[in-house]
Image: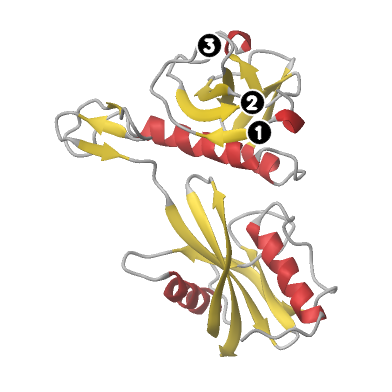
Amino acid sequence: MATSTIHWSPGWTTKAPERGDLVLVLSGGGILKLADDWLQPLEAVPENAGNTGFVSLGSAGGRPVFVTEVPEPPGAESDVVPLRDALLAASDVPAAMLSTGFQVWQWFRDHQYCGRCGGSTGFHRRERAKWCNRCNIPWYPRLAPCVIVVIRKQDRYLLAKSSRVQRHFYSLIAGFVEPGESLEAAVAREVKEETGLDVTNIQYQASQPWPFPHQLMAGFFADYAGGELVLQEDELADAGWFLPGSRPPVPPDTTISGRLIRDMERMIASGGNRT
């Protein structure tokens, strides 16, 4: 099923796939594409697919969709696209389906056994969960909440380059939410830890699933409130204040960081102020 024809809806079933059902086939850290299609009919997937099982993802065009994995690509006619490359590509990539597929498969692999008693788990009949009959508890797909923020200082905003990931672009301050912490408190703490800066007027803007392996990114705007840049070296290689139109390369609009940056640039360029 070509990209332009995918109209995917999330869903859940414990039924096994049947002939004609569609399959998202993973291989290592990527998606196996055959004939330039993201989804394959069950009868067309490689013979070694499904050895570790199939997991329901929902439906596309009225046909059930499942995810599975193959250890090795079947041959030269196949193309394994890394997930990060797919999500950073053109806007017509079915990002929500691919993200869900990777996160659901990660959950399926990680919860073959109960984390409390060590017994085998099975699928919950009514919802996406693994179920332990001995403990009578469900194991749901894990989500790790993260925050990501654009910090504005008058007509400039802060960009930073990671010291951990070798990419050519600059991005935003981000980090995981701690237990018992609000999203806004996580923004202030992460900014202080990584840059030494204080922020105020922290306001939510948007969110995006980010399946590396199971983050949910919550995006914010914030205003500079004081302090000098002191970088946490194990997190940031460089950071600075930039004017719209005179900045280094940043992530594309397929990412929440790219969209937040461009939204802030438009706000500054238009002379807009936040209240």
Disc marking residue 61: 2
User: Residue flagged by tag 3: what amino acid is it?
Assistant: Asn
Q: Is residue 15 left or right of residue 130?
A: right
Residue located at (66% from left, 74% from top):
239
Q: Secondary structure at mark 3?
A: loop
Badge 1: how crowded within 10 Å, few (<14), some, or many (20+)? Answer: few
Nearer to us of marks 2 and 3 is 2
Check contact, mark 2 vs mark 3: CB within 8 A: no
Residue located at (75% from left, 24% from top):
36
Q: Position of residue 209 (x, y in %)?
A: 54, 50
User: Residue flagged by tag 1: what amino acid is it?
Assistant: His
Which residue matches tag 1? 7
Screen quadrant of the C terminus = bottom right
Q: Position of residue 220 (x, y in %)?
A: 57, 71
Which residue matches tag 3? 48
Q: Secondary structure at mark 2?
A: loop
Screen quadrant of the N terminus = top right
Nearer to us of marks 1 and 3 is 1
| Image height of 263 relative to 135, above or below | below
What is the CA distance from the residue labelled 2 to the residue labelled 3?
26 Å
Q: Is residue 21 left or right of residue 185?
A: right
Q: Secondary structure at mark 1?
A: loop
Check contact, mark 2 vs mark 1: CB within 8 A: yes
Residue located at (47% from left, 46% from top):
214
User: Residue flagged by tag 2: what amino acid is it?
Assistant: Gly
The residue at the far right in this view is 245
Residue located at (82% from left, 79% from top):
269
Q: Nearer the viewer, residue 122 or 231?
A: 122
Can residue 198 be seen from the camera position used here? no
